Amino acid sequence: MRVKVSAHDILEKSLGKTMLVRLKDRRGLRGRLEGFDEHLNLVLKDAEYLSGSSDVKKLGSIILRGDNIVTVSPRKLQNTMCARNAH
């Protein structure tokens, strides 16, 4: 039997955790998920822009529009995301 799990369910369980976000323009961001809405707009606290190198630009608290987001993943995938962002 399959259990249907929605994006909202996953995000609800991820509140307060550090997440990695990939945007349509291939930029990568990392931050603590503070909130979201029905359009999957995200609020990240202590957000940082991840460039292809080890450089990190601190952004603080930000709101990301849901239709610009390609992926949201747990922090443990950070190294993979940074490597792909360099291309």
Image: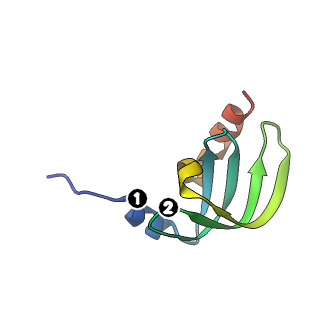
Q: Is residue 23 above or below residue 38?
A: above
Alpha carbon distance from label 1 to label 2: 8 Å
Query: Label 2 sits on what residue type?
Result: Leu
Please tell me which of labels 1 and 2 falls first in the chain: 1
At which x and y percent is residue 79? 67, 41
At which x and y percent is residue 60? 78, 67
Q: Which mark is residue 40?
A: 2
Numbered disc 2: secondary structure: loop
Q: Which residue is mark 1?
A: 7
Q: Residue at x 67, y 32 (%)?
A: 84
How busy is the neighbourhood of tag 1: few (under 14 within 10 Å), some, or many (20 plus)? few
Q: Which mark is residue 49?
A: none
Q: Residue at x 45, y 70 (%)?
A: 12
Q: Are marks 1 and 2 in contact (CB under 8 Å)?
A: yes
Relative placement, left or right, of 78 versus 38 is: right
Q: Is residue 8 above or below residue 68?
A: below
